[in-house]
């Protein structure tokens, strides 16, 4: 029987518990390996990554190809692996795909007593969040945030460094948790913090990677803990970080990468059931590579779908996480993503799910892919809007290609459509059912930062002009309908010194530059003000397209100007390097909420309008009409 067939899934799909089921009196090990002819459980003397074998035990095969063995006694902190033999004589050593603990560098699994992996005061989830469109997401890399020499943070590059209080630079710039919580963002989205393969946890030498190279999906990354050699420490400290952020009212989104693995030969999936968990081309021999990472996982296979649901719900229940960002989500199928949505809804329907809905070249029918064109079939799963990103600042694929904020003509109408939530974009590219499916952004961890992009597109600009373009683009993100998303440091014009893809660049390139935060403090204050305006004025957070269509009325959408009404509000974006007069503004008295790089939710000043206003170069304006 073909292991990648529907018949195989139907015959061997298993619904019972999997993994090491710990109790103080004994642990039962359960492994799904239907193609194996023999499985042995290997227990090691200690949790040292090179410890010798303590015991080997043959496991018993049961229904659906599930192998079990029960070992009496308290096995907390016991390292283990599986040795599998197959009908062709091949033998493989595998760690446990369902393991929650691992030795240093992750090549052996570890049994853990869950009660001993929770920090003091660990409690319940935060109360449910409101609407997804009320969120402001801030994407952060754990190491970047604290590694700077002048950060004032002790636990540099660690989970615990994120939540140190009262830290500042020698010149008095507030850093760390106090800085983070001052911005007004609602959700902190961390780049991968599960156990990834590219950083040597045994080394103290400076190392860097974003973490998009999965090894153990259900284990925190050891290099972010203070002691990677002690398996429980990484769980405790990751929970302490989440707990500390929750205490400041900040929710946590975890970046997950189920679409590929780093190296099939060392990853549990391939060693436990060879050939099953991955997608192949029509010849049945060539691995699919739509992810461009050497392999594509096959979420449409029932046991991988089940694994993804189990993994996500584990992180929700055990770590109280508030959301998940799916890397290359377009590699996954619609049914799997909807199954995940249904599963987390049973725990907390306000959990945010977002992902990259790019249409990858993987052999999955297009009508099954979790892509933007199929978004309407995945309610309450959000997609990054490349239409917003590229129409505002220019294509990410061509460094010198600009768009609206760069002064290029012809993008005004497309940008306005995106500002209004993207309901009427080309349905073959993006078909959303509600604004909560749209992640509005112009910068993320990959590609050039917005600042570095502007260096390419507008090399003639002086620093002041470049800053105005930058803050104009950020204004559009925070005033758009949908879910706004900021890359950490975007608020102070973050640069990576022109490095486009810094996934393994050194700290000097990726560092969160606190000196730059001090230099561009006015830009930071502006972002704080925009976030406060968004929170205080519900018109920017509408939840359905009908309400947006009823409220919206274009005023001017040409010549580098986008001006429109949302009921009693007037929003204007001027991408020209000169003052422009915008006509057809309804006559009356207005409160100015946003103007020339300053924003305040209660108003900056009042303005009497007689049909037109003069808008400063490269700036955003928001006016609220005062009721007579």
Image (cartoon, grey):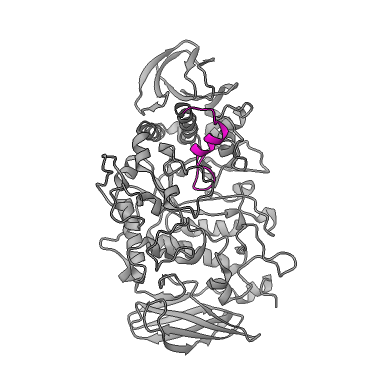
Residue 274, picture quadrant: bottom right
Residue 454 falls within the magenta-colored stretch: yes
* Front-most of residues 35 and 48: 48
Q: Which residue reaches farthest top?
A: 610
* Front-most of residues 365 and 579: 579
Indicate the position of residue 294 as horizontal and vertical percent values: 62, 62
Indicate the position of residue 308 as horizontal and vertical percent values: 52, 64
Residue 474 falls within the magenta-colored stretch: no
Q: What are the residue bounds of the magenta stretch?
A: 442-462
As drawn, 390 above or below 201: above
Q: Which of the image's four quarters has the C terminus? A: top left
Indicate the position of residue 344 as horizontal and vertical percent values: 47, 58
275 on left or right of 133: right
As drawn, 483 above or below 197: above
Q: Which of the image's four quarters has the N terminus? A: bottom right
Q: Evaluate whether residue 333 shows in this view.
A: no
* Front-most of residues 152 and 296: 152
Q: Residue at x 47, y 10 (%)?
A: 610
Indicate the position of residue 4 as horizontal and vertical percent values: 67, 71
Q: Main secondary structure of the magenta part?
A: loop
Q: Please give the count of numbered marks on the rendered protein.
A: 0
Q: Evaluate whether residue 607 shows in this view.
A: yes
274 on left or right of 195: right
């Amino acid at each position: 029987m073909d292991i990648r067939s529907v018949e195989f899934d139907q015959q061997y799909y298993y619904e019972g518990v999997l993994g090491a089921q710990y109790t103080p009196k004994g642990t039962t090990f359960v492994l799904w390996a239907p193609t194996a002819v023999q499985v042995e459980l290997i227990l090691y003397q200690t949790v040292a990554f090179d410890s010798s074998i303590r015991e080997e035990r043959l496991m018993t095969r049961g229904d659906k190809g599930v192998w079990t063995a029960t070992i009496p006694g308290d096995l907390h902190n016991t390292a283990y692996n599986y040795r599998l033999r197959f009908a062709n004589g091949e033998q493989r050593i595998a760690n446990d795909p369902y393991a929650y603990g691992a030795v240093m560098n992750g090549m052996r699994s570890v049994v853990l007593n869950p009660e001993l992996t929770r920090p003091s005061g660990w409690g319940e989830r935060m109360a449910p969040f409101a609407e997804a469109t009320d969120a402001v997401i801030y994407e952060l890399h754990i190491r970047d945030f604290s590694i700077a020499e002048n950060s004032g943070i002790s636990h540099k590059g660690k989970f615990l460094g994120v939540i140190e209080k009262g830290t500042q630079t020698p010149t008095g710039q507030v850093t760390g948790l106090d800085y983070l919580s001052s911005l007004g963002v609602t959700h902190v989205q961390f780049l991968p913090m599960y156990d990834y393969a590219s950083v040597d946890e045994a080394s103290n030498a400076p190392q860097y990677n974003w973490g998009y190279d999965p090894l153990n999906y259900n284990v925190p990354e050891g290099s972010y803990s203070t002691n990677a050699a002690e398996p429980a420490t990484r769980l405790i400290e990751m929970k302490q970080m989440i707990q500390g952020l929750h205490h400041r009212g900040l929710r946590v989104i975890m970046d997950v990468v189920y679409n590929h693995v780093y190296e099939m030969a060392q990853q549990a999936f391939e060693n436990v059931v060879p050939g099953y968990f991955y997608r192949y081309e029509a010849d049945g021999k060539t691995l699919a590579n739509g992810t461009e990472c050497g392999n594509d996982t096959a979420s449409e296979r029932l046991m991988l779908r089940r694994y993804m649901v189990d993994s996500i719900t584990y992180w929700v229940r055990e770590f109280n996480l508030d959301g998940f960002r799916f890397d290359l989500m377009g590699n996954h199928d619609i049914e799997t993503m909807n199954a995940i949505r249904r599963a987390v809804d049973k725990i907390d329907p306000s959990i945010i799910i977002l992902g990259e809905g790019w249409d990858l070249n993987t052999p999955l029918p297009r009508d099954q892919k979790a892509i933007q064109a199929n978004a309407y079939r995945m309610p309450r799963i959000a997609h990054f809007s490349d239409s917003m990103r590229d129409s505002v600042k220019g294509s990410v694929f061509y460094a010198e290609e600009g768009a609206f904020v760069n002064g290029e003509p012809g993008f005004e109408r497309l940008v306005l459509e995106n500002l209004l939530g993207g309901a009427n974009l080309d349905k073959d590219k993006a078909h959303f059912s509600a604004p909560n499916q749209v992640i509005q952004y112009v910068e993320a961890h990959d590609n050039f930062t917005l600042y570095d992009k502007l260096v390419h597109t507008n090399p003639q600009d002086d620093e002041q002009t470049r800053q105005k373009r930058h803050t104009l683009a950020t204004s559009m993100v925070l005033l758009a309908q949908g879910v706004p998303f900021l890359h950490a440091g975007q608020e102070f014009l973050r640069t990576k010194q022109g490095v486009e893809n810094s996934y393994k660049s050194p700290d000097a390139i990726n560092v969160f530059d606190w000196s730059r935060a001090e230099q561009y403090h006015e830009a930071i204050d502006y972002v704080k003000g925009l976030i406060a305006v968004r929170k205080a004025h519900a018109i920017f957070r509408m939840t359905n397209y009908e309400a947006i269509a009823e409220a919206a009325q274009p005023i001017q959408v040409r010549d580098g100007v986008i001006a429109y009404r949302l009921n009693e509000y007037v929003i204007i974006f001027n991408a020209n390097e000169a003052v422009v007069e915008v006509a057809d503004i309804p006559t009356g008295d207005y409160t100015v909420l946003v103007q020339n790089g300053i924003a305040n939710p209660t108003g900056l000043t009042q303005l009497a309008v007689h049909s037109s206003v003069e808008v400063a170069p490269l700036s955003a304006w928001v006016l609220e009409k005062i009721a007579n």
